[in-house]
Image (cartoon, rainbow, N blue to C red):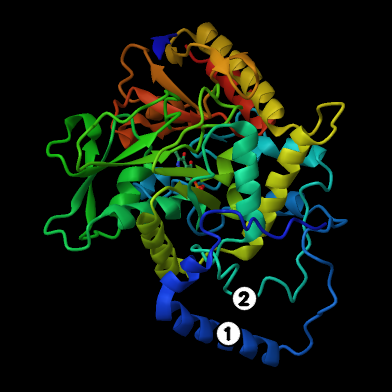
């Protein structure tokens, strides 16, 4: 990187983990837990005799536009969102996030990577991404007790594997699929799984600067005795560690490899942005632990679904145990929605689609290409900022040479006298994330490139006026 200015298929029984071995290995704990859960379900059924049991089957399209309704609703009244756990003052949810700037001089909030850009694609998809879940369906805690990951919906498992085969960005077939409440939960599950339980000292968790701003905060907020944040991977001393490799990297879009290479070291690959709308797909990744998220793949951040591809069965079991203890599984409703969304994407490429209308990655790439063009023009006009440059590569998915269009702009302010780019932009009512949260200099900020067109256009207009 250089610098200048209906119904879904029931299940995938051929998967490695879809065996009775997985069930047996859960042991009596699951059986006890199972009887507890079944009791709960029985109580629910008894207590709610008027439940409508004649609803439509899962996956049938509905008349209404659930997605639109949900996305128009104010999403930020309370609770935590993506990346909102560090330094409350500056990274907490702002009332402007998620809403359209009403006037030309309104506050423009591009602090969070909220992927609302994808709304217009899903509006164009009509009812292809809709699901209806009848009141009586998806009640049980359990999704598939024959699977090691007993809370994984078979439809979700099937569509994940199908999508990876289609895109060619990761090898899923010799890995366990583990679903999580966002990849944020899976990241914590992976730390738990990789840390020796009897360690005298917490294991160091490191990542090369600039690293994703949530890594330090999510690692340390519970002050675990198992692991602790130790900062920049390049400065890591010792040979026992967990290295987080985010590629393409949040915040700067660079393609990364592990910087450490010790026999006792372990690596988690966060591949949230390894999709063709952001970067050329140059090979199918095949690491021991790979994390992905629906939020950056399709835009459905609010469904809070992520998945891990995990090679080793014992590591997979410990990650599953973490999720069992942390949230007793993952929302079935969300998994079913995500499965339908993924099905719609793969169908868009694998079924006849004469106008190329239903191709998510084409939509994403086109939008990102246009946005990066506008941003680079604005930076040029302004003359006080610079952006990273990227080399094109052959993309095995697009079957042509393609450019890199990261989901975030890693913007440096070169204006004399400006030491803190985030404050400078804030004074012009542009909210961004300060470089310091990524272990980098305050002259840098991270800006989301995934907001709605209207917000993005206002942003580039305002940026070009700054001199
Ligand atoms: C690199 C990276 N990993 C993980 C996440 C979290 O994803 P999720 O919304 O699935 O928790 C994000 C979200 O911005 C991210 O940028």
Of residues 425 and 173, the one nearer the viewer is 173
Residue receiving disc 1: 38
Disc 2 residue crowd, few under 14, some 14–19, many 20+, Cα 10 Å: some
Which residue is at 39% across, 18% downward? 412
Q: Quadrant of residue 26?
A: bottom left
Residue at which label 2 appears: 140
What residue is shown at x 50% (from left), y 40% (from top)? 112
- Above/below status of 401 relative to 329: above
Residue 261 shown left or right of residue 154 in the figure: left
Question: Would residue 11 be found to the left or right of residue 353 on screen?
Answer: left
Residue 287 visible in the current orientation:
yes
> Percent from the top left, x then y, of residue 364?
66, 29
The residue under the point 84% across, 44% down is 126
Q: Is residue 246 left or right of residue 202?
A: right
Q: Quadrant of the N terminus?
A: top left
Q: Secondary structure at mark 1?
A: helix
Q: Residues within 10 Å of mark 1 (few under 14, many from 20)?
A: some
Spatial CA span between label 1 and label 2: 7 Å
Instruction: Tell me which label, 1 or 2, sits earlier in the chain.
Output: 1
Which of the pair 75/95 is nearer the observer?
75
Q: Nearer the viewer, residue 159 or 360?
A: 159
Q: Position of residue 378 (x, y in %)?
A: 56, 13
């Amino acid at each position: 990187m250089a610098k200048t200015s209906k119904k879904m298929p029931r299940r995938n029984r051929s998967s490695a983990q879809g065996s009775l071995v997985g069930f047996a290995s859960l042991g009596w704990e699951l059986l006890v837990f199972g009887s507890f859960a079944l009791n709960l379900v029985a109580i629910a059924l008894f207590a709610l005799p008027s439940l409508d049991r004649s609803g439509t089957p899962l996956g049938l399209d509905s008349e209404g536009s659930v997605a639109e309704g949900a996305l128009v609703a104010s999403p930020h009244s309370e609770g935590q969102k993506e990346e909102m756990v560090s330094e409350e003052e500056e990274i907490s949810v702002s009332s402007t996030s998620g809403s359209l700037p009403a006037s030309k001089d309104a506050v423009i909030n591009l602090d969070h990577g909220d992927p609302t850009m994808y709304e217009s694609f899903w509006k164009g998809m009509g009812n292809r991404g809709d699901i209806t879940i009848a009141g009586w369906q998806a009640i049980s805690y359990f999704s598939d007790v024959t699977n090691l990951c007993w809370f994984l919906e078979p439809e979700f498992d099937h569509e994940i594997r199908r999508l990876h085969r289609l895109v060619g960005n990761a090898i899923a077939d010799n890995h366990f699929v583990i679903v999580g409440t966002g990849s944020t939960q899976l990241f914590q599950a992976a730390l738990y799984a990789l840390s020796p339980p009897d360690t005298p000292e917490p294991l160091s968790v490191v990542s090369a600067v600039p690293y994703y701003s949530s890594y330090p905060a999510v690692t340390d907020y519970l002050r675990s005795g198992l692991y602790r944040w130790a900062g920049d991977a390049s400065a890591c001393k010792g040979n026992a560690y967990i290295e987080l490799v985010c590629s393409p990297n949040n915040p700067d879009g660079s393609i990364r490899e592990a910087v450490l290479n010790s026999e006792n070291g372990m690596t988690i690959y966060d591949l949230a942005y390894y999709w063709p709308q952001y970067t050329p797909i140059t090979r199918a990744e095949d690491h021991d632990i790979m994390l992905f998220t629906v939020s950056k793949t399709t835009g459905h951040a609010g469904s809070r679904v992520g998945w891990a591809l995990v090679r080793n069965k014992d590591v997979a079991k410990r990650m599953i145990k973490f999720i069992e203890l942390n949230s007793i599984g993952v929302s079935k409703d969300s998994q079913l929605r995500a499965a339908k969304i993924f099905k719609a994407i793969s169908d868009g490429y694998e079924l006849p689609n004469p106008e190329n209308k239903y191709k998510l990655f084409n939509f994403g790439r086109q939008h990102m290409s246009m946005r990066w063009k506008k941003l680079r023009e604005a930076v040029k006009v302004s003359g006080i900022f610079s952006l990273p440059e990227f080399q094109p590569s052959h993309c095995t998915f697009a079957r042509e040479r393609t450019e890199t269009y990261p989901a975030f702009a890693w913007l440096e302010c070169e204006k004399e006298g400006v030491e803190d780019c985030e404050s400078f932009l804030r004074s012009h009512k542009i909210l961004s994330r300060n470089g310091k949260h990524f272990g980098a200099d305050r002259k840098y900020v991270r800006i989301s490139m995934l907001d709605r067109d209207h917000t993005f256009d206002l942003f580039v207009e305002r940026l070009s006026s700054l001199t």
